[in-house]
Image (tube, rainbow, N blue to C red):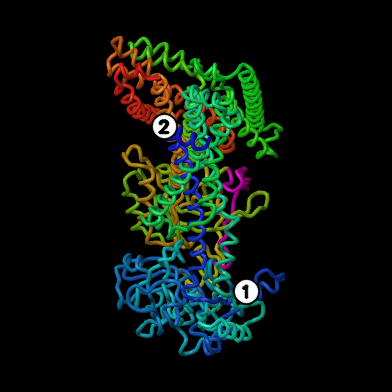
C-alpha cells in the first residue's frame, strides 16, 4: 500500500508543490528563529566575556555565597595594592596580569573635543580587550592609545599629542583631595578605600593636579599625553561606548583623581596563565589564590562563559526566540489551511482510484493510513528543505555583517532543535491538516466513487461549528465591552477595576479580540462565501469572464473559506499593528505637546554661545533664545523644598518667541520671578508665598565663593553681589505664576528671572540653556532631521543634552517605526504563505475544471477570456478577504490603542490609509501573479484532449 501511495504522490506532484512551498516557508522561519537565538546567545556570551581580552583566568569576587553588606563594602573598596600584582606576575606560570579599571574622559586637541571610554593598559597586547590596530599599547608614562573613531574626530594620528581631562581630575586638582573613581558599570564602580591623597614633588600629574610639559599646573586644562597607538573593538567589549582607549598607569590614575596607581580601586584582575599542562595551571592558580584578599577567587574563562550562557538562557534572548517562534507557529497554522485544501482536492480527484483499491481488497484503515502517510512524506521532504533554507538564510545573514551595526558579530551556530523542532512541527502540522481528508477517503465506496461527488461539510459538522463560532464571538464581544467600560470609568475618575487591576483588564481585552477573531475564522465557511457571492454578483456585470469567475468561486465554498481565512489572518494582523502604531504616534504627539511649553531644549554646563548660534541656524528651528542657568533650591508655602532651574532672560518678550503659553500681561523685572503653576514632578499646584528665596547648594556655593567675582579668602568664604557672605548665594523675589508646562523634566520647576541677576554677580551661572521653537513642516524638513541636526551641533560638548517634546516624539516614533517594521516583516511570512494558498486554490480549481474549461473553449471562449476569468477569481479571493482583514484589524487596533494610550491622553483613532492600501495592493498584485501559472495550464490544454480526460 505504501508503494502505491508513493506512486500516487509522484503522479500528483504538481498539485502537492504549492502545499510543500507553504510548509517549506513555515519550517524555514522556525529553523531560522532557532538559529537566530543561537547566534544571539553566542554573540552575547562572547560580548559578555570580551572584556577578558586574551585572559584565560580572572580574579573576581566570590559568587553564590551569602555576603553581608560589610563584606560587599569590603569587596568594592579594594585597590590595586590589595591584589599584590607584582607578586602575582612573579608567580611561576603567570605570563601577565592586568588590573581592570575603566572610566570616561574628555580628549581635546585644539578646539576639538571628544568623549572616550578609557581602560588600563597591560604589559602584553594579548591581555587587552581591544585590538591595537596601529602603533603600540601605552607602556610608559603620559601615553594613550585612542579609539580610531576619536582619533578621526579629532584629526590626530600616532605620535601626536592630545589633552585628556575628567571631572574627578578637575575636582582633585581644585580641592587637593583624591576623588572617588569615575568607573563605569561593566568594570569597577568602587570608591577609593581611604579617600586621602598625599602630594609630593614627583606626583603632581598623578594627583589630578596635572603638570604640563613646562611644569605648569594644569588642573583645569587637563593632562597632555602622547598618542602611541589606535584601537579597535572587534568583539564589542565596549560597543555601548563606541570602543575604548587605553591609558598608561599614571594617566588613568590622574583621571580617577587618585594620587597613586596602587590606590586605584579595582575588583577584577585578568590573568594570562600558561595552561599547556592542566596540572601546572592548577598549581599556578593555587599559588595565586594565596595572594588574594578575602572574598576573592580565581575562575577560569571557560567557567565564566558557561555562567554567561546559563544566565542568558532565561533572559532576553529566550524571550526574543519565543516571540519569533510565535510568528513561525502562526505561519505554520496558515500553511495548515493551504495543506488541508490540497488534500481535500486530492481525495476528491482520487475517488475512482480509491474505489478500485477498495474493490481489490484495501480496507478503510489502509486508505486512512495511506492519506496520512502521504501527508507525512510531504511534510518530511518540505520540512527538510525548509530547514536547509533556514540555515542558508542565517548563514548569509552572518556573512553579510549586517548585525555589526548593533555592535555584535554573529556566527552560524547549529544545534539539535534547529533540525528536530521545525521538522517535527512541519510533519505533525501536515498530518493534522490531512486528517479531514483521510476521513473522507474512508467514506468512499466503489459505487459512490463512480459518480462525481463534491466534498462538503455535513449538516451536523456545520451546526457544531456555527454554535462554537457564535459562542466565541459573543464571549469575545462581552470581554471587549467590559474592558472598554472599565477603562472609561477609570478615565472619568470613578471606581474601576482598571485602577488597581489594569493588567487583568488589558488581558481581558486581548482575550476578547482573540476570541472574536477565532470565532470569525471558524465561521468563515458560512459568511465569507456569502460576502464573495455578493461582491461577485456586482463584478459579474463586467462581462463574461467576470461572470464565469463569479460562478466558479461559488462551487466550493469550503475551499474558498479556507483560502480566504488564511489571507484574513495575515492582513488582520498587519492592519492591527499599523493602526496601533499610528494611534500611538498621534496620541503621544498630542500628549507631549500639551505637557511641554517649549518644543526643544538644549542644556548643559559646557554649552557655548557659538553652538547656540549654530543651532539657531538649523533648518526647522524657527526661533531660539540662549540663556544662563543655575540650579537652586526653594521652599514653597507648605515648607517643602523644591529643586528649581533658574534661567536668566531679557524680559518676557524673549520668552514669547519660544514658550507656547499665554504670557499676556506678564512682566519680568529685577524684583520678580516667573514661576510655573504646576510642578513638573508631581503635576500638582505649587503653593507660593508673597516672596520666594532661592538658595544655591552648599557645595556649589563653596566652589563659587572660592572662584567668585568678589574674590576669596583662605577659608573659602566670599561676599557675593547681593552682599551675602559665608559662601552662600540667595535670591529673594516676588513670584508671578503662569500656567506654562514643563521646560526641563529634571527639575520640579523652571523659573525665569531677569538676566541682570547673572550679569551683576547676584547668581553665578553653572550652565546654559537654549529654548527653541520648531516648525519642521513649514521648513519642509523631517522632524527627525531637525532633532538630529541640533544634536550634531552640540555633539562636541559631552555635558549638553537635547530634550523636549520634539526629542521625545522623535525617539518615540523611531522606536514605534522600528517595532512596526519588525512585526510587519514577520507577519509578511504568513501573508506570503496565504498568497501561496491563493495560487494553490486556483491551480486545484483549474485541475478540477479541466472538462469545464474545455467546454467553454469549445463553445467560443477565447484564451484571453479564460485567463481573465482566473485573474478575476484570484482578485475576488484576495481583495474580499483583504478588505475584511483591514476592517477587523482597524477595529482591533483602535481597541488596543484605547486600552493602552488612554492612560496618557485623549486617544486618537486613525485609519492607516497608506499601510492598508499597500497591503491590499500587494495582495491584489500577488493574486494576479498567482493566476498566471494556473491560467497557462488551463489554456495550454487543447479542448479535444481535455474533453477526453477521465
Height in image: 244 above or below 767? below
Q: Residue 618 location, x and y as percent?
A: 32, 48
Q: Is residue 835 visible?
A: no
Q: CA distance from mark 2 to mark 1?
A: 69 Å
Numbered-mark total: 2
Q: Position of residue 346 (x, y in %)?
A: 48, 27
Main secondary structure type of the part rendered in magenta: loop
Give the residue pinned by disc 2.
11
Q: Nearer the viewer, mark 2 or mark 1?
A: 2
User: At 33% from the left edge and 11% from the top edge, which residue is drawn?
Assistant: 544
Residue placed under numbered mark 1 in the picture: 61
**Foreground of the two, 405 or 363:** 363
In the rendered view, would you say 511 is above or below 262?
above
Q: Which stretch appears magenta?
A: 678-700
Mark 1 Cα within 10 Å, few/some/many (few <14, many 20+)?
A: some
Left or right of 943, for residue 260: right
Q: Quadrant of the C terminus?
A: top left
Amino acid at each position: 500500500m505504501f508503494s502505491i501511495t508513493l506512486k500516487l504522490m509522484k503522479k500528483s506532484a504538481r498539485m502537492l508543490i504549492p502545499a510543500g512551498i507553504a510548509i517549506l516557508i513555515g519550517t524555514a522561519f522556525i529553523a531560522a528563529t532557532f538559529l537566530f537565538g543561537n547566534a544571539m546567545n553566542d554573540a552575547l556570551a562572547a560580548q559578555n566575556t570580551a572584556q577578558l581580552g586574551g585572559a584565560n583566568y580572572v580574579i573576581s569576587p566570590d559568587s553564590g555565597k551569602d555576603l553581608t553588606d560589610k563584606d560587599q563594602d569590603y569587596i568594592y573598596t579594594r585597590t590595586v595594592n590589595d591584589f599584590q600584582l607584582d607578586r602575582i606576575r612573579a608567580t611561576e606560570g603567570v605570563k601577565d596580569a592586568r588590573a581592570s579599571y575603566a572610566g570616561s574622559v574628555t580628549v581635546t586637541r585644539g578646539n576639538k573635543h571628544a568623549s572616550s571610554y578609557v581602560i588600563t593598559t597591560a604589559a602584553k597586547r594579548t591581555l587587552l580587550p581591544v585590538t591595537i590596530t596601529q602603533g603600540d599599547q601605552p607602556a610608559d608614562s603620559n601615553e594613550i592609545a585612542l579609539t580610531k573613531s576619536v582619533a578621526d574626530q579629532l584629526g590626530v594620528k600616532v605620535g601626536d599629542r592630545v589633552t585628556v581631562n575628567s571631572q574627578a581630575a578637575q575636582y582633585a586638582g581644585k580641592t587637593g583631595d583624591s576623588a572617588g573613581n569615575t568607573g563605569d558599570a561593566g568594570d569597577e564602580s568602587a570608591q577609593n578605600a581611604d579617600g586621602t591623597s598625599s602630594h609630593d614633588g614627583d606626583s603632581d600629574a598623578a594627583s589630578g593636579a596635572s603638570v604640563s610639559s613646562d611644569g605648569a599646573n594644569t588642573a583645569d586644562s587637563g593632562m597632555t599625553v602622547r598618542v602611541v597607538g589606535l584601537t579597535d573593538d572587534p568583539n564589542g567589549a565596549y560597543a555601548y561606548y563606541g570602543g575604548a582607549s587605553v591609558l598608561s598607569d599614571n594617566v588613568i590614575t590622574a583621571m580617577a583623581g587618585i594620587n597613586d596607581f596602587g590606590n586605584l580601586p579595582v575588583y577584577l584582575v585578568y590573568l594570562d596563565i600558561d595552561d599547556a599542562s592542566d596540572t601546572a595551571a592548577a598549581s599556578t592558580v593555587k599559588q595565586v589564590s594565596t595572594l588574594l584578599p578575602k572574598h576573592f577567587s580565581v575562575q577560569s574563562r571557560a567557567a565564566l562563559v558557561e555562567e554567561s550562557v546559563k544566565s542568558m538562557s532565561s533572559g532576553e534572548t529566550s524571550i526574543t526566540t519565543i516571540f519569533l517562534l510565535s510568528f513561525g507557529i502562526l505561519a505554520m497554522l496558515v500553511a495548515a489551511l493551504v495543506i488541508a485544501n490540497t488534500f481535500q482536492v486530492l481525495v476528491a480527484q482520487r475517488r475512482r482510484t480509491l474505489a478500485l483499491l477498495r474493490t481489490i481488497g484495501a480496507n478503510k484503515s489502509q486508505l486512512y493510513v495511506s492519506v496520512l502517510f502521504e501527508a507525512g512524506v510531504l511534510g518530511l521532504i518540505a520540512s527538510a528543505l525548509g530547514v536547509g533554507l533556514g540555515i542558508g538564510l542565517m548563514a548569509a545573514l552572518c556573512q553579510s555583517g549586517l548585525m555589526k551595526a548593533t555592535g555584535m558579530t554573529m556566527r552560524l551556530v547549529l544545534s539539535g532543535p534547529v533540525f528536530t523542532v521545525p521538522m517535527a512541527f512541519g510533519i505533525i502540522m501536515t498530518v493534522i491538516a490531512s486528517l479531514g481528508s483521510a476521513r473522507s477517503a474512508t467514506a468512499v465506496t466503489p459505487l459512490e466513487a463512480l459518480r462525481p461527488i463534491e466534498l462538503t461539510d455535513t449538516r451536523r459538522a456545520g451546526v457544531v461549528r456555527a454554535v462554537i463560532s457564535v459562542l466565541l464571538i459573543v464571549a469575545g464581544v462581552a470581554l471587549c465591552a467590559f474592558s472598554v467600560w472599565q477603562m472609561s470609568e477609570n478615565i472619568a475618575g470613578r471606581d474601576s477595576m482598571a485602577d488597581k487591576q489594569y493588567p487583568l483588564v488589558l488581558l481581558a481585552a486581548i482575550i476578547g479580540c482573540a476570541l472574536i477573531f477565532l470565532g470569525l475564522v471558524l465561521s468563515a465557511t458560512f459568511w465569507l462565501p456569502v460576502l464573495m457571492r455578493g461582491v461577485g454578483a456586482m463584478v459579474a456585470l463586467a462581462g463574461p469572464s467576470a461572470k464565469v469567475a463569479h460562478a466558479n468561486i461559488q462551487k466550493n465554498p469550503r475551499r474558498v473559506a479556507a483560502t480566504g481565512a488564511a489571507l484574513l489572518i495575515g492582513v488582520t494582523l498587519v492592519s492591527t499593528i499599523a493602526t496601533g502604531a499610528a494611534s500611538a504616534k498621534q496620541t503621544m504627539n498630542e500628549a507631549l505637546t500639551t505637557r511641554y511649553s517649549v518644543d526643544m531644549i538644549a542644556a548643559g554646563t559646557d554649552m557655548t554661545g557659538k553652538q547656540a548660534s549654530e543651532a539657531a541656524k538649523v533648518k526647522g528651528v524657527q526661533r531660539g533664545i540662549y540663556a544662563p542657568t543655575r540650579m537652586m533650591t526653594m521652599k514653597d508655602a507648605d515648607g517643602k523644598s523644591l529643586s528649581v532651574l533658574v534661567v536668566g532672560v531679557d524680559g518676557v518678550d524673549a520668552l514669547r518667541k519660544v514658550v507656547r503659553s499665554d504670557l499676556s500681561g506678564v512682566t519680568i523685572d529685577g524684583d520678580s520671578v516667573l514661576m510655573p503653576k504646576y510642578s513638573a514632578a508631581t503635576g500638582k499646584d505649587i503653593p507660593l508665598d508673597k516672596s520666594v528665596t532661592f538658595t544655591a547648594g552648599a557645595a556649589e556655593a563653596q566652589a563659587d565663593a572660592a572662584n567668585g567675582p568678589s574674590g576669596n579668602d583662605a577659608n573659602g568664604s566670599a561676599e557675593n553681589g547681593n552682599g551675602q557672605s559665608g559662601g552662600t548665594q540667595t535670591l529673594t523675589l516676588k513670584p508671578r505664576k503662569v500656567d506654562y508646562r514643563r521646560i526641563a523634566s529634571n527639575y520640579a520647576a523652571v523659573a525665569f528671572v531677569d538676566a541682570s541677576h547673572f550679569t551683576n554677580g547676584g547668581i553665578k551661572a553653572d550652565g546654559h540653556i537654549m529654548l527653541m521653537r520648531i516648525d519642521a513642516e513649514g521648513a519642509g524638513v523631517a522632524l527627525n532631521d531637525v532633532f538630529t541636526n541640533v544634536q550634531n551641533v552640540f555633539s562636541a560638548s559631552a555635558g549638553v543634552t537635547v530634550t523636549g517634546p520634539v526629542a521625545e516624539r522623535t525617539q518615540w516614533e523611531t522606536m514605534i517605526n522600528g517595532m512596526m517594521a519588525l512585526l510587519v516583516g514577520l507577519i509578511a511570512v504568513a501573508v506570503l504563505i496565504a498568497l501561496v494558498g491563493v495560487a494553490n486554490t486556483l491551480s486545484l480549481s483549474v485541475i478540477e475544471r479541466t472538462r469545464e474549461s474545455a467546454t467553454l473553449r469549445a463553445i467560443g471562449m477565447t484564451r484571453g477570456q479564460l485567463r481573465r476569468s482566473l485573474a478575476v477569481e484570484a482578485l475576488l479571493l484576495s481583495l474580499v478577504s483583504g478588505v475584511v482583514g483591514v476592517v477587523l484589524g482597524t477595529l482591533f487596533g483602535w481597541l488596543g490603542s484605547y486600552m493602552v494610550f488612554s492612560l496618557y491622553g485623549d486617544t486618537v483613532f486613525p485609519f492607516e490609509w497608506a499601510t492598508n492600501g499597500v497591503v491590499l495592493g500587494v495582495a491584489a498584485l500577488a493574486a494576479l501573479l498567482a493566476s498566471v501559472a494556473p491560467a497557462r495550464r488551463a489554456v495550454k490544454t487543447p479542448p479535444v484532449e481535455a474533453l477526453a480526460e477521465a
